[in-house]
């Protein structure tokens, strides 16, 4: 990495029932289980298939992806803007908005099965064609208790 | 984003008691609470401070960072190599190894307090000077149950 930036490349893509960003039912964000029933696949490029060895034993995966359709924040709002269905502007680092200084997304999905370089998953909230940058196993250290969740009721 | 890659820039840096990568006690990885008592700070650059508004209400934060010291996988192992203190090679996407196709890390920290653009946190497992790419609030949807954690005993 240099000061000029970190060049990342997709290792695969998401196949989602949400074909366009507008198809994602954002009202489900207020329910922690809102996307649990959304199924799809993550397809890695052939050159990365070997890296999926041993993944089958994990029930949940951390997917880091690019918000590839995200442009500037709506309304030129900079680092503050209202989340969906809200009126109060919030700091971007206190939201999961796709409009961020670095367009990185993170979603934890449930692994349903694997066929070669294709993972069947549920809990998807990404749009079709989302570039996947990394997959990591979700482990006990990622499960936190006694949460305070700020402005999110 | 273009096919040529995704250019990301740091929004700040981690200040950690681990001054060199070798100082990180990797044996603590086997304990889900192994790094809970490790305190440090995340300092954002001044131009991003406004984005921290409303973050104080959250107990836990998702930090996405660059494994800026990670070179190629040890021993030229490609996409398979043994995790620390293990002998069996594992697929990289089934590990949290810093040696990944894209050098992205993700750690969930506890937010202890904030002074302007400096967050006091605990649960750090990053080295001093780690470039921070994004901060997101950890919410109920990130807390998963009935985990299976594969090769990790």
Image: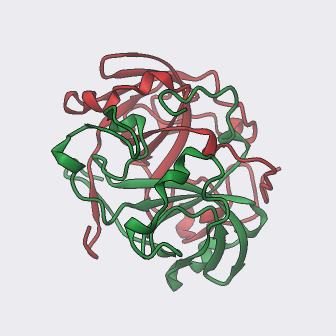
Chain colours: A red, B green
Q: Identify the residue at image location x=53%, y=78%.
A: B44
Task: Decide if residue B88 is on the left or right side of residue B19.
Answer: left
- Quarter location, residue A134: top left
Q: Is residue B126 above or below residue A62?
A: below
The location of residue A81, given as percent across then percent down, is: 64, 64
Is A153 or A59 nearer to us in this picture?
A59
In the figure, A11 relative to B45: above or below? above
Q: Nearer the viewer, residue B31 or B95?
A: B31
Quarter of the picture containing the C terminus of chain B is top right
Q: Is residue A33 left or right of residue A75?
A: right
Nearest the camera: B20 or B4?
A: B20
Give x and y (percent) for residue A84. Answer: 68, 50
From this viewpoint, is residue B85 visible? yes
Q: Residue at x 43, y 45 (%)?
A: B96
Could you tell me residue A139's position as x and y percent? 57, 38
The answer to whether one can see residue B54 in this image is no
Q: Position of residue B127 (x, y in %)?
A: 44, 69
Image check: A6 left or right of A79? left
Q: Is residue A82 above or below residue B118?
A: above
Q: Is residue B4 above or below residue A4?
A: above
Give left or right: position of B96 versus A32.
left
Residue shown at the point (26%, 67%) measured from the top left: A1
Examine the image and state in which quarter residue B7 appears.
bottom left
């Amino acid at each position: 990495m240099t000061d000029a930036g970190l060049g990342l490349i997709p290792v695969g893509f998401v196949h989602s029932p949400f074909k366009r960003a507008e198809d994602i039912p954002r009202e489900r964000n207020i329910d922690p289980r809102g996307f649990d029933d959304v199924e799809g696949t993550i397809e890695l490029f052939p050159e990365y298939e070997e890296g999926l060895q041993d993944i089958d034993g994990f029930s949940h995966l951390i997917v880091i992806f690019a918000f590839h359709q995200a442009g500037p924040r709506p309304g030129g709002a900079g680092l503050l803007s209202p989340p969906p269905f809200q009126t109060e502007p919030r700091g971007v680092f206190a939201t999961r908005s796709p409009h961020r200084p670095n367009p990185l997304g993170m979603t934890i999905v449930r692994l349903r099965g694997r066929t070669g370089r294709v993972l069947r998953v549920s809990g998807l909230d990404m749009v079709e064609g989302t570039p996947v940058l990394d997959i990591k196993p979700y482990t006990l250290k990622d499960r936190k208790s006694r949460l305070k969740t700020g402005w999110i009721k």
